[in-house]
Amino acid sequence: MYSINYDAARNRITVKIHEINKENVQNYIEEYSKVLESVKPGFTGLTDLSEGKLFSMDVAEQLSFLGELSVQKGLTKWAYYTGSAVSKLQMKRMFGEVVDSFEKLEDAEAFLQG
């Protein structure tokens, strides 16, 4: 229901989310935390929520600490793209100023390159 990949050459975590729910949220947190052990300071992140479902409130609460954990590991920029205004609001509420949202992958990539 999701995939997490780390590209060492670009020092970037890429996440594609279809659905994170109460059945798989702990697995996601464990996998993401394990990937964070590989990053170098100054890393960037990209999340594809274009086909994703909104998180329930309890799942959003469980995930919200990952933004701060990422900053502690050296995150500089994180972009996500989605066509959903509600999803954008949810990400902003969960991760605050750490993330920027875009409607197109190209715009998110351009932001991360800049």
Image: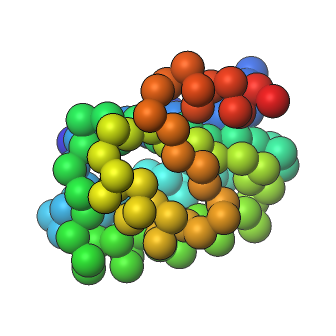
Could you say where residue 104 lies in the image, as x and y percent from the top left? Answer: 46, 27
What colour-coding does the image apply? Answer: rainbow
Which quadrant does the N terminus fall into? Answer: top left
Residue 59 vs residue 7: left or right?
left
Total number of numbered labels?
0
Q: Residue at x 53, y 46 (%)?
A: 101
Query: As displayed, is residue 49 above or below residue 86?
Result: above
Residue 107 vs residue 11: left or right?
left
Residue 76 vs residue 86: left or right?
right
Residue nearest the observer in this picture, 93 or 14:
93
Residue 20 vs residue 82: left or right?
left
Quarter-wise, where is residue 20 in the image?
bottom left
Residue nearest the observer in this picture, 105 or 45:
105
Could you say where residue 96 lies in the image, as x and y percent from the top left? Answer: 59, 69
Q: Residue at x 75, y 42 (%)?
A: 43
Q: Residue at x 21, y 70 (%)?
A: 56
**Can residue 39 be seen in this snapshot?**
no
Which quadrant does the C terminus fall into? Answer: top right
Quarter-wise, where is residue 12 in the image?
top right
Q: Residue at x 47, y 70 (%)?
A: 94
Query: As displayed, is residue 41 above or below residue 5?
Result: below
Quarter-wise, where is residue 39 in the image?
top right
**Can residue 68 be seen in this snapshot?**
yes
